Amino acid sequence: DVPYKIEWREFPAAAPLLEALGAGALDTGLVGDAPFTFAAAANVPVKAIAAIRSTQEGLAVLVPKESPIRSFDDLKGKKIATGRGSIGHQLVLAALEAKGLSPKDVQLVFLAPSDAKIAYSQGAVDAWSTWEPYVSQEEVLFGSRRVITAEGLTPGLSFQVARPDAIAGKRAELQDFVQRLSRARAWSLSNVAAYADTWGKLMGIPPAVPLNWLSRAKIRITAVDDAVVAGEQQTIDLYFRNGLINRSLKAEDIVDRSFAPAIEAALASQ
């Protein structure tokens, strides 16, 4: 029921999505702040046009149910699987800094989510720093435990990003899309069970998994404002300090605030 054509493509993580954006195969996509920062520093042509906030309970370092590891401190010297430049990587770096430690104090094993799941399940790594729905899948279906979450450690931002040429040439479509996205997210906050049921059916997983995730995530769309820019700058600075990006960036240069009025109007209509 939209006045334009949508071609939907799914990706297992933000990195391949951003590669597709960089190659011009996509116009827009949803990514976490950490991989967005990684891509922007590598000159991938994308800008954030809307922000997504949520609690950080679903970004966590997991350990198996029977693991003797009880806290993040117990992971010193241990193997932690995550994706390089991902929000899972971001969490580990932020947690290490908060504890006065460095990346050298753990063994980071960089793997794609599917490979990390295998390594974690087979005991080839001690922990897995990952995000939803993987966190809830492991908790609900296999009894994994979260030894630390990103709550209070990272900004809790994701972004709807778009290529500059799409912003210029498809502004009306992108504006309509982010407005619809804003209204849909507002609806989902008031209809968590129904949304979780639909999400589970679409993804072919038990509804208890998305219900566990969505009931605590409180996902909502927000316009790119000063607080969002400050949060993104925090991620940029974290990555630059830890050598993940070889140059610093100004967060203001990689966002586009011009969609803010449309997003605010959509939210006000709810």
Image (cartoon, rainbow, N blue to C red):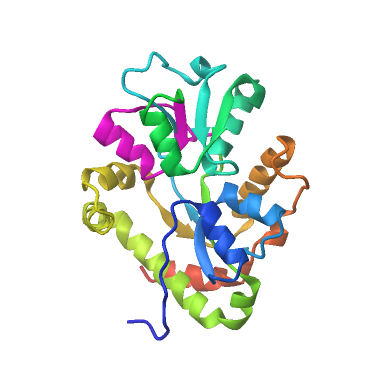
Residue drawn at x 63%, y 80% is 168
Kindly give the residue lying farthest to the right in the view shown.
247
Q: Quadrant of residue 140?
A: top left
Image: magenta residue range: 127-152
Point out residue 153 in the picture as x, y percentages from the top left corner.
55, 34
- Magenta stretch: includes residue 132: yes
Is 78 located above or below residue 1 in the figure? above
Q: Quadrant of the N terminus?
A: bottom left
Point out residue 40 in the picture as x, y percentages from the top left corner.
67, 56
Point out residue 62 in the picture as x, y percentages from the top left corner.
41, 29
Question: Is residue 102 among the parts visible in the rendering?
Answer: no
| Residue nearer the viewer, 247 or 231 | 247
Residue drawn at x 67%, y 38% is 238
Residue drawn at x 42%, y 74% is 7
| Residue nearer the viewer, 42 or 186 | 42
Question: Is residue 218 among the parts visible in the rendering?
Answer: yes
Point out residue 244 in the picture as x, y percentages from the top left corner.
69, 41
Q: Quadrant of residue 123?
A: top left
Relative to 98, 119 lies left or right: left
- Magenta stretch: includes residue 118: no
Count of numbered tags: 0
Q: Quadrant of residue 267?
A: bottom left
Q: Quadrant of the C terminus?
A: bottom left
Residue drawn at x 46%, y 25% is 125
